[in-house]
Image (cartoon, rainbow, N blue to C red):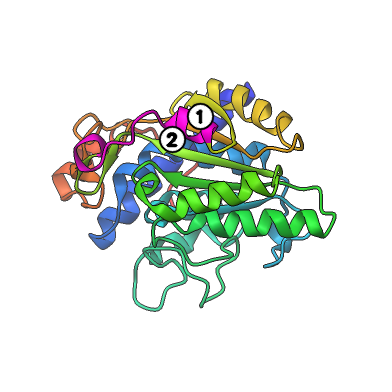
Amino acid sequence: MSEITELKKVATQVRRDVLRMVYEVQSGHPGGALGCADIFTALYFKFLKIDPKAFTMDGKGEDLFFLSNGHLSAAWYSVLARSGFFPLEELATFRHIDTRLQGHPATEEGLPGVRVASGSLGQGLSVAVGAALAKKLNKDDRLVFCLMGDGEQQEGQIWEASMFAAGRKVDNIIGIIDYNGQQIDGACDDVMPLGDLKAKWEAFGWTVLEMNGNDMEDIVQTIPKAIEKTGKQKPVVILMHTEMGYGVDFMEGTHEWHGKPPNEEQFNKAIANFEETLGDY
Protein backbone atom coordinates (compact mmCIF):
# COMPACT_ATOMS: atom_id res chain seq x y z
CA MET A 1 0.00 0.00 0.00
CA SER A 2 1.41 3.40 -0.95
CA GLU A 3 2.35 6.07 1.57
CA ILE A 4 -0.30 8.41 0.16
CA THR A 5 -2.96 5.73 0.60
CA GLU A 6 -1.87 5.16 4.21
CA LEU A 7 -2.01 8.88 4.97
CA LYS A 8 -5.46 9.12 3.42
CA LYS A 9 -6.63 6.26 5.63
CA VAL A 10 -5.45 8.11 8.72
CA ALA A 11 -7.11 11.35 7.61
CA THR A 12 -10.38 9.50 7.00
CA GLN A 13 -10.28 8.09 10.52
CA VAL A 14 -9.46 11.52 11.92
CA ARG A 15 -12.62 12.86 10.29
CA ARG A 16 -14.63 10.06 11.91
CA ASP A 17 -13.07 10.96 15.26
CA VAL A 18 -13.92 14.64 14.81
CA LEU A 19 -17.55 13.96 14.03
CA ARG A 20 -17.94 11.53 16.93
CA MET A 21 -16.19 13.80 19.45
CA VAL A 22 -18.30 16.84 18.59
CA TYR A 23 -21.54 14.88 18.34
CA GLU A 24 -21.16 12.97 21.61
CA VAL A 25 -20.60 16.10 23.70
CA GLN A 26 -22.88 18.28 21.50
CA SER A 27 -20.25 20.99 21.45
CA GLY A 28 -17.32 21.93 19.27
CA HIS A 29 -16.19 23.09 15.85
CA PRO A 30 -16.48 20.40 13.17
CA GLY A 31 -16.17 22.51 10.00
CA GLY A 32 -12.55 23.62 10.14
CA ALA A 33 -11.42 20.41 11.83
CA LEU A 34 -12.80 18.34 8.93
CA GLY A 35 -11.13 20.69 6.45
CA CYS A 36 -7.73 20.40 8.13
CA ALA A 37 -7.64 16.66 8.82
CA ASP A 38 -5.26 16.13 5.90
CA ILE A 39 -2.61 18.64 6.97
CA PHE A 40 -2.68 17.42 10.60
CA THR A 41 -2.21 13.87 9.33
CA ALA A 42 0.60 14.72 6.94
CA LEU A 43 2.52 16.69 9.55
CA TYR A 44 2.27 14.16 12.37
CA PHE A 45 2.56 10.97 10.35
CA LYS A 46 5.23 12.06 7.86
CA PHE A 47 6.97 15.39 8.30
CA LEU A 48 7.40 16.46 11.92
CA LYS A 49 10.64 15.30 13.51
CA ILE A 50 9.22 14.40 16.92
CA ASP A 51 9.16 11.67 19.55
CA PRO A 52 5.61 11.28 20.94
CA LYS A 53 6.85 9.07 23.79
CA ALA A 54 9.41 11.64 24.99
CA PHE A 55 7.42 14.87 24.88
CA THR A 56 8.95 17.89 26.63
CA MET A 57 7.67 21.44 26.82
CA ASP A 58 10.91 22.95 25.48
CA GLY A 59 11.11 20.54 22.54
CA LYS A 60 14.87 20.78 22.15
CA GLY A 61 16.10 18.97 19.08
CA GLU A 62 12.57 18.46 17.75
CA ASP A 63 10.24 20.24 15.37
CA LEU A 64 7.52 22.23 17.12
CA PHE A 65 3.89 22.65 16.08
CA PHE A 66 1.59 25.40 17.30
CA LEU A 67 -2.16 25.51 16.58
CA SER A 68 -3.16 29.16 16.52
CA ASN A 69 -6.77 28.55 15.46
CA GLY A 70 -7.37 26.45 18.54
CA HIS A 71 -11.01 25.72 17.75
CA LEU A 72 -9.71 22.96 15.43
CA SER A 73 -8.73 21.02 18.56
CA ALA A 74 -10.81 17.92 17.77
CA ALA A 75 -8.69 17.13 14.70
CA TRP A 76 -5.46 17.90 16.55
CA TYR A 77 -6.38 15.72 19.51
CA SER A 78 -7.27 12.86 17.17
CA VAL A 79 -3.89 13.02 15.45
CA LEU A 80 -2.00 13.42 18.73
CA ALA A 81 -3.70 10.32 20.15
CA ARG A 82 -3.30 8.24 17.01
CA SER A 83 0.39 9.14 16.73
CA GLY A 84 1.05 8.06 20.32
CA PHE A 85 1.04 11.16 22.53
CA PHE A 86 -1.75 9.89 24.81
CA PRO A 87 -4.23 6.98 24.93
CA LEU A 88 -6.79 6.84 22.14
CA GLU A 89 -9.61 6.19 24.63
CA GLU A 90 -9.07 9.67 26.08
CA LEU A 91 -10.71 11.16 22.98
CA ALA A 92 -14.03 10.18 24.61
CA THR A 93 -13.42 12.89 27.24
CA PHE A 94 -13.40 15.73 24.69
CA ARG A 95 -14.85 18.93 26.20
CA HIS A 96 -15.89 17.23 29.44
CA ILE A 97 -15.43 18.97 32.79
CA ASP A 98 -11.82 18.65 34.06
CA THR A 99 -10.66 16.81 30.93
CA ARG A 100 -7.21 17.33 29.45
CA LEU A 101 -8.98 17.71 26.09
CA GLN A 102 -10.52 21.13 26.50
CA GLY A 103 -12.52 22.69 23.67
CA HIS A 104 -9.54 24.93 22.99
CA PRO A 105 -6.09 23.50 23.74
CA ALA A 106 -4.88 24.23 27.26
CA THR A 107 -1.73 23.45 29.23
CA GLU A 108 -2.99 23.38 32.83
CA GLU A 109 -3.70 19.63 32.81
CA GLY A 110 -0.47 18.77 30.99
CA LEU A 111 -1.68 17.17 27.76
CA PRO A 112 1.33 15.81 25.84
CA GLY A 113 1.75 17.52 22.48
CA VAL A 114 0.31 20.88 23.60
CA ARG A 115 2.81 23.57 24.53
CA VAL A 116 0.62 26.66 24.72
CA ALA A 117 -3.04 27.46 25.31
CA SER A 118 -4.56 28.69 22.07
CA GLY A 119 -7.78 29.83 20.53
CA SER A 120 -7.56 33.55 21.22
CA LEU A 121 -7.18 34.25 17.53
CA GLY A 122 -4.19 36.18 16.26
CA GLN A 123 -1.76 35.13 18.98
CA GLY A 124 -0.38 31.80 17.80
CA LEU A 125 2.01 33.17 15.19
CA SER A 126 3.67 35.40 17.80
CA VAL A 127 4.28 32.36 20.01
CA ALA A 128 5.60 30.33 17.09
CA VAL A 129 7.95 33.10 15.95
CA GLY A 130 9.27 33.41 19.49
CA ALA A 131 9.88 29.67 19.68
CA ALA A 132 11.61 29.72 16.29
CA LEU A 133 13.85 32.59 17.37
CA ALA A 134 14.72 30.69 20.55
CA LYS A 135 15.75 27.68 18.46
CA LYS A 136 18.05 29.88 16.39
CA LEU A 137 19.62 31.40 19.50
CA ASN A 138 20.11 27.91 20.96
CA LYS A 139 21.68 26.58 17.73
CA ASP A 140 18.80 24.11 17.41
CA ASP A 141 18.36 23.29 13.73
CA ARG A 142 14.79 21.97 13.94
CA LEU A 143 11.77 23.83 12.51
CA VAL A 144 8.64 25.44 13.90
CA PHE A 145 5.24 25.02 12.20
CA CYS A 146 2.19 27.17 12.93
CA LEU A 147 -1.34 26.58 11.62
CA MET A 148 -3.56 29.67 11.42
CA GLY A 149 -7.04 30.44 10.14
CA ASP A 150 -7.84 32.84 7.34
CA GLY A 151 -10.24 34.79 9.56
CA GLU A 152 -7.25 35.28 11.85
CA GLN A 153 -5.58 37.29 9.12
CA GLN A 154 -7.93 40.11 10.12
CA GLU A 155 -6.04 40.41 13.43
CA GLY A 156 -3.36 43.07 13.72
CA GLN A 157 -1.13 40.88 15.86
CA ILE A 158 -0.64 38.53 12.92
CA TRP A 159 0.98 41.30 10.95
CA GLU A 160 3.11 42.50 13.87
CA ALA A 161 4.46 38.95 14.19
CA SER A 162 5.01 38.69 10.45
CA MET A 163 6.97 41.95 10.39
CA PHE A 164 9.10 40.84 13.32
CA ALA A 165 9.86 37.45 11.77
CA ALA A 166 10.91 38.96 8.46
CA GLY A 167 12.83 41.80 10.10
CA ARG A 168 14.79 39.41 12.34
CA LYS A 169 15.28 36.86 9.54
CA VAL A 170 13.50 34.11 11.47
CA ASP A 171 13.91 31.62 8.65
CA ASN A 172 13.19 28.40 10.56
CA ILE A 173 9.41 28.84 10.69
CA ILE A 174 6.70 27.62 8.31
CA GLY A 175 3.30 29.23 8.72
CA ILE A 176 0.26 27.49 7.23
CA ILE A 177 -2.98 29.38 6.67
CA ASP A 178 -6.23 27.40 6.44
CA TYR A 179 -7.65 29.39 3.53
CA ASN A 180 -11.27 28.20 3.33
CA GLY A 181 -12.89 31.62 2.99
CA GLN A 182 -15.20 31.09 5.97
CA GLN A 183 -15.26 32.32 9.56
CA ILE A 184 -17.78 32.06 12.37
CA ASP A 185 -19.89 35.04 11.26
CA GLY A 186 -19.91 34.29 7.55
CA ALA A 187 -17.68 34.40 4.50
CA CYS A 188 -14.42 36.24 5.11
CA ASP A 189 -15.16 38.50 2.14
CA ASP A 190 -18.39 39.58 3.82
CA VAL A 191 -16.94 40.10 7.30
CA MET A 192 -13.67 41.78 6.35
CA PRO A 193 -12.21 41.08 2.90
CA LEU A 194 -8.66 39.75 3.01
CA GLY A 195 -7.69 41.08 -0.40
CA ASP A 196 -4.66 39.59 -2.12
CA LEU A 197 -3.32 37.55 0.80
CA LYS A 198 -0.38 36.19 -1.18
CA ALA A 199 0.75 39.69 -2.18
CA LYS A 200 0.39 40.90 1.41
CA TRP A 201 2.58 38.15 2.88
CA GLU A 202 5.16 38.67 0.14
CA ALA A 203 5.14 42.40 0.85
CA PHE A 204 5.77 41.62 4.52
CA GLY A 205 8.91 39.74 3.53
CA TRP A 206 7.81 36.09 3.60
CA THR A 207 8.31 33.39 0.98
CA VAL A 208 4.81 32.28 -0.05
CA LEU A 209 3.69 28.92 -1.41
CA GLU A 210 0.18 27.64 -2.15
CA MET A 211 -1.36 24.18 -2.03
CA ASN A 212 -4.63 22.29 -1.96
CA GLY A 213 -5.06 21.27 1.68
CA ASN A 214 -7.61 18.60 0.80
CA ASP A 215 -5.33 16.84 -1.68
CA MET A 216 -2.84 14.60 0.14
CA GLU A 217 -0.63 14.30 -2.94
CA ASP A 218 -0.32 18.08 -3.17
CA ILE A 219 0.42 18.37 0.56
CA VAL A 220 3.14 15.72 0.39
CA GLN A 221 4.73 17.52 -2.57
CA THR A 222 4.47 21.04 -1.13
CA ILE A 223 5.67 20.61 2.45
CA PRO A 224 9.16 19.49 1.32
CA LYS A 225 9.33 22.55 -0.96
CA ALA A 226 8.54 24.75 2.03
CA ILE A 227 11.18 22.99 4.14
CA GLU A 228 13.74 23.50 1.36
CA LYS A 229 13.05 27.24 1.46
CA THR A 230 13.84 27.56 5.17
CA GLY A 231 17.31 28.72 6.21
CA LYS A 232 17.39 31.33 3.47
CA GLN A 233 16.96 34.50 5.56
CA LYS A 234 13.18 34.63 5.06
CA PRO A 235 10.26 33.02 6.91
CA VAL A 236 7.94 30.78 4.88
CA VAL A 237 4.14 30.65 4.72
CA ILE A 238 1.80 28.32 2.83
CA LEU A 239 -1.65 29.45 1.70
CA MET A 240 -3.53 26.17 2.11
CA HIS A 241 -6.81 26.14 0.18
CA THR A 242 -9.42 23.92 1.87
CA GLU A 243 -13.16 23.43 2.11
CA MET A 244 -14.70 23.90 5.53
CA GLY A 245 -16.55 20.68 6.40
CA TYR A 246 -14.64 18.76 3.74
CA GLY A 247 -16.10 15.36 2.92
CA VAL A 248 -19.62 16.01 4.25
CA ASP A 249 -21.81 17.43 1.50
CA PHE A 250 -24.16 19.39 3.74
CA MET A 251 -21.26 20.88 5.75
CA GLU A 252 -18.96 21.88 2.91
CA GLY A 253 -18.37 25.48 1.89
CA THR A 254 -20.48 27.20 4.54
CA HIS A 255 -19.73 28.90 7.84
CA GLU A 256 -22.83 27.33 9.40
CA TRP A 257 -20.83 24.34 10.65
CA HIS A 258 -17.95 26.38 12.00
CA GLY A 259 -19.08 25.85 15.58
CA LYS A 260 -22.26 23.74 15.52
CA PRO A 261 -22.53 20.02 16.41
CA PRO A 262 -24.72 17.71 14.31
CA ASN A 263 -27.85 16.10 15.72
CA GLU A 264 -28.25 12.30 15.61
CA GLU A 265 -29.66 12.18 12.09
CA GLN A 266 -27.02 14.57 10.79
CA PHE A 267 -24.24 12.68 12.55
CA ASN A 268 -25.28 9.36 11.05
CA LYS A 269 -25.49 10.91 7.60
CA ALA A 270 -22.13 12.66 7.99
CA ILE A 271 -20.09 9.79 9.38
CA ALA A 272 -21.37 7.46 6.65
CA ASN A 273 -19.11 9.43 4.27
CA PHE A 274 -16.01 8.05 5.95
CA GLU A 275 -15.09 4.38 6.13
CA GLU A 276 -13.71 3.15 9.46
CA THR A 277 -10.05 2.64 8.53
CA LEU A 278 -8.09 2.38 11.79
CA GLY A 279 -10.78 1.51 14.32
CA ASP A 280 -12.93 4.00 16.19
CA TYR A 281 -11.98 5.03 19.70
Q: Considering only vertical position in the picture, is 98 above or below 156?
A: below
Picture residue at 21% right of the left edge, 52% below the top: 260
Give the alpha-carbon distance from disc 1 to disc 2, as whole Å: 6 Å
**Residue at numbered disc 1:** 8
Left or right: where does residue 165 sit relative to residue 142?
left
Q: Which residues are magenta?
A: 188-203
160 or 145, which lies in front? Answer: 160
SS for tag 2? helix
- At label 2, which amino acid type do we have? Thr
Q: Is residue 135 visible?
A: yes
**Crowd rating for badge 2 (residues with CA inside 10 Å; few <14, some 14–19, many 20+):** many
Answer whether residue 84 is visible to the viewer in this image: no
Residue 135 at x, y = what percent? Answer: 76, 56
Q: Are marks 1 and 2 in contact (CB under 8 Å)?
A: yes
Residue 23 screen position, x and y as percent: 26, 54
Could you tell me the amino acid type at mark 1?
Lys
Which residue was labeled with disc 2? Answer: 12
Q: Is residue 259 left or right of residue 209?
A: left
Dot 1 lies on which element?
A: helix
- Residue 106 rendering spot, x and y as whole percentages: 47, 69
Whether 197 is among the magenta residues is yes
Residue at image coords 23%, 29%: 249
Quadrant holding the N terminus: top right
Residue 240 covered by magenta stretch = no
Q: Is residue 114 left or right of residue 187?
A: right
Name the residue nearer the viewer: 31 or 175: 175
